[in-house]
Amino acid sequence: MAASQFNTATLLTDGSVEVDGPLDVDLAVTVSSEVEFRFLLVQGDVVVQGRGRGTAGFWSGKTLLGEPPLKEGNALAIGLAFVGTRTPPGYETFGWSENIRL
């Protein structure tokens, strides 16, 4: 799997954030056609967790509500993908981080 990334990060009216990005994984070697994602969005002292799922070519997810909430502007996005593999049986993980705009 290549280093995934965030394509878009949309701040919703309720204060949560929807994100998405590309997913390049060889489904022939995976246990499931889905890949699990965990991510953090960081603005100053505010850190918000999110979760997502992906299939071949695309992933998307949503954050929990932050307290205080995230605001429009720059944020650090940190992602982690979990891929179950058949041979050898186990998990591969892939992490990345980048600066994004909400």
Image (cartoon, rainbow, N blue to C red):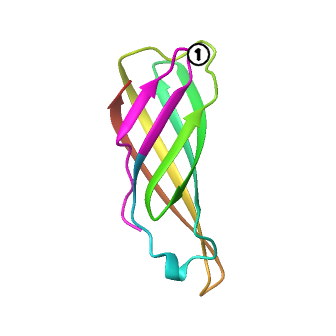
Figure check: 72 above or below 5: above
Q: Nearer the viewer, residue 9 or 75?
A: 9
Identify the residue under disc 1.
14
- Look at the image and give the residue range highlighted in magenta: 1-20
Q: Nearer the viewer, residue 88 or 8?
A: 8
Figure check: 53 above or below 33: above
Residue at point 44% right, 69% down?
A: 25
Predominant secondary structure in magenta? loop
Residue at point 39% right, 55% down?
A: 4
Figure check: 36 above or below 97: below
Single out the residue that lies furthest toward the bottom. Answer: 87
Residue 53, position in %: x, y? Answer: 57, 52
Q: Amino acid at mark 1?
A: Asp
Residue 3 is covered by the magenta coloring: yes
Residue at point 63% right, 22% down?
A: 65
Residue 15, position in %: x, y? Answer: 56, 17
Q: Quadrant of residue 30?
A: bottom right
Quadrant the N terminus occupies = bottom left
> Dot 1: within a 10 Å radius of its alpha carbon, few (fewer than 14), some, or many (20 or more) residues?
few
Quadrant the C terminus occupies = top left
Residue 44, position in %: x, y? Answer: 46, 19
Residue 93, position in %: x, y? Answer: 54, 63
**Number of marks:** 1
Residue at point 37% right, 36% down?
A: 8
Q: Secondary structure at mark 1?
A: loop
Q: Nearer the viewer, residue 89 or 21?
A: 21
Q: Quadrant of residue 73?
A: top left
Relative to 16, 101 lies left or right: left
Q: Nearer the viewer, residue 70 or 31?
A: 31
